[in-house]
Image (cartoon, rainbow, N blue to C red):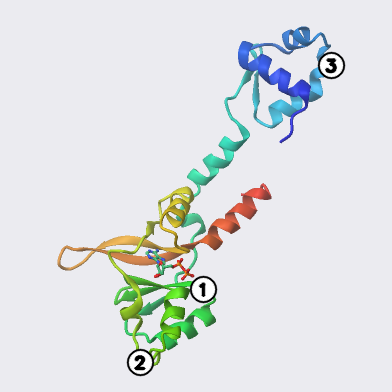
Amino acid sequence: MELSKRQETILEIVKKEGPITGEQIAERLGLTRATLRPDMAILTMSGLLEARPRVGYFYSGKKPGREMAEKLHQTLISDIKSVPVVVPEQCTVYDAVVTMFIEDVGTMFVVREGGLLEGVISRKDLLKTTLGGQDIHNLPVGVIMTRMPNVVYVESDASVWEAARRLIAHEVDALPVVRQVKGNDGRIDLEVVGRFSKTNVTRLFVELGEGGY
Ligand code: ADP
């Protein structure tokens, strides 16, 4: 939001002297209260200033960027995750390519019985194998996937910010959203319950830009 020069000055006065009444601000500027009314309305509506009856105006401490940051930390993966596309480890590279086209995703998760996470397969994994001239009708994806424990994942109660940070830090396009489950042998397994990709981030970004989230 662009502030006018006068609004910037008001903000500075309130930051330094708040709480301060409208009368006093007007006095500092050598203007009438009526002249300042539209500026005060803009500054309070935008959340930069808060007004308390009989106390006056004070600076809310919220920079406009802070609100966006709060939204990104408050929005949880469970609010915006997508449905995962999964294949079994025995699925051939050929069938995985077909599934990728049909489901229109860039990353698929490889699971065993119960939807338990085994690995991740991306566009480039499939492309590389195909270019390598291997027999893609007989080669199972289990051979070429990125396997646990090297898979970067996220849980539903993580924030969108944390998940997006992992996408960037690990240079991947998508993360499986998982739930921890205890196996028969007491081992902790990860059940795939969703997909979080750069598309989810972009969609949220567009919604935030529209002010609609
Ligand atoms: P693309 O192949 O379209 O460039 P990525 O950049 O996501 O997609 O994948 C690059 C490599 O990282 C691939 O080898 C893939 O198996 C691996 N990969 C993809 N997602 C993950 C993830 N969540 N955790 C670990 N490795 C991943």
Camera-side residue of 176 and 2: 2
Q: Count residues near mark 2 (Cα–Cα under 10 Å), then give few for <14, some for 14-19, many for 20+.
A: few
Question: In this rendering, does residue 18 appear at all?
Answer: no
- Which residue lies at the image location 80% right of the left edge and 20% below the top edge? 37
- The kind of secondary structure element at disc 1 is loop
Q: State which image quarter holds ligand 1.
A: bottom left
Residue shown at the point (69%, 26%) measured from the top left? 44
Badge 3 marks a residue whose secondary structure is helix
Q: Amino acid at mark 3?
A: Ala
* Residue 159 spot, x, y in % from top left: 45, 49
x and y, in percent, of residue 167 in the image: 45, 57
Location of residue 155 by image quarter = bottom left
Pointer 3 residue Cβ closer than 8 Å to ligand 1: no
- Please tell me how crowded label 1 is: few (under 14), some (14-19), or many (20+) other residues with Cα within 10 Å: some
Picture coordinates of residue 76 (x, y %)? Answer: 47, 51
- Kindly identify the amino acid type of the residue bearing the numbered disc 1: Val
- The dot on residue 105 is 1
- Residue on which the image places disc 3: 34
Contact between labelled residues 3 and 1, with CB atoms less than 8 Å apart: no
| Local crowd size for mark 3, using a 10 Å CA cut-off: few (<14), some (14–19), many (≥20) | few
Q: In terms of sequence position, does the residue under pointer 1 or pointer 3 come before the other? A: 3
x and y percent of residue 14 in the render?
65, 16
Residue underneath mark 2: 138
Relative to the observer, which residue lies in front, 122 or 35?
Answer: 122
Disc on the earlier residue, 2 or 1: 1
